[in-house]
Amino acid sequence: MSSADSFEPAAPPRPQKRGWWSRNWMWATPVGCLTPLVLCGGCVFAVIGGVFGALKASDPYQKSLAAVRADAEVQEALGAPIEPGWLVQGNLNVTNGASSADLNYPVSGPNGSGTVYVVGEAEGDGLWVYREMRIRIDGGPEIDLLPPGAADAPAENLSEEPMQAIEEPADEIEEAEAP
């Protein structure tokens, strides 16, 4: 046999080196798509949580919830303990030292549920005057939570601990500020 008749097998072709994308596309695609969605969802959740937290920390919300829990007629209708729902609706405005609130939120107890409505205003001194504070029991009566004549009185009479107003004569303040 001649050398032309001999057959030597060719070396097997080298496998091409695959790129990063071809090796990792199965996990990179979902992660790349879900990461922005999770971040956006987290931001939305943080904003909503902050708004509800601010409403629930407000004086009108706290005072009305305390009034609901302290009212014997409400306790009889809903049972005890009375717990607020997570959704607070309405608005709370603070403009140049004057505040106003118009809120409503659900409450429930072992025997039923209802919706609390509170409307009030405060001037720069921080004392709230409530025009309306009531609860509408689902399938039952509407109960006014303000004491008689309290619609035009400062809210300190609704507080568990009365607020102490510190008043200094204007002359003393001016003297202290002057060099």
Image (tube, rainbow, N blue to C red):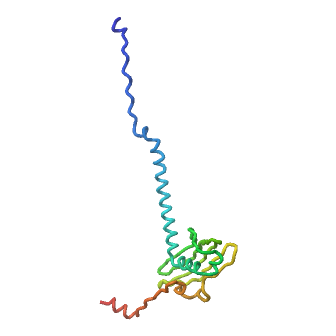
Q: Quadrant of the C terminus?
A: bottom left
In the image, residue 124 above or below residue 24: below
The picture quadrant where one finds residue 102 is bottom right
Q: Residue furthest top?
A: 1
In the image, residue 83 above or below residue 39: below
Q: Residue furthest right?
A: 139
Does residue 21 appear to the left or right of 134 in the view shown? Answer: left
Residue depicted at 48% across the width and 49% down the height: 33
In the image, residue 24 above or below residue 127: above
Residue depicted at 47% across the width and 45% down the height: 29
The picture quadrant where one finds residue 141 is bottom right
User: Which of 143 and 96 lies nearest the eye of the viewer?
Assistant: 143
User: Which of 148 and 8 lies nearest the eye of the viewer?
Assistant: 148
Where is residue 67? Give x, y as percent: 57, 80
User: Which of 177 and 69 lies nearest the eye of the viewer?
Assistant: 69
Where is residue 44? Give x, y as percent: 50, 61
Residue depicted at 49% across the width and 54% down the height: 37
Where is residue 25? Give x, y as percent: 45, 41
Q: Quadrant of the N terminus?
A: top left
Instruction: Tell how many labels.
Output: 0
Residue depicted at 61% across the width and 72% down the height: 109
The picture quadrant where one finds residue 131 is bottom right
Where is residue 16? Give x, y as percent: 39, 31
Q: Residue furthest left?
A: 179
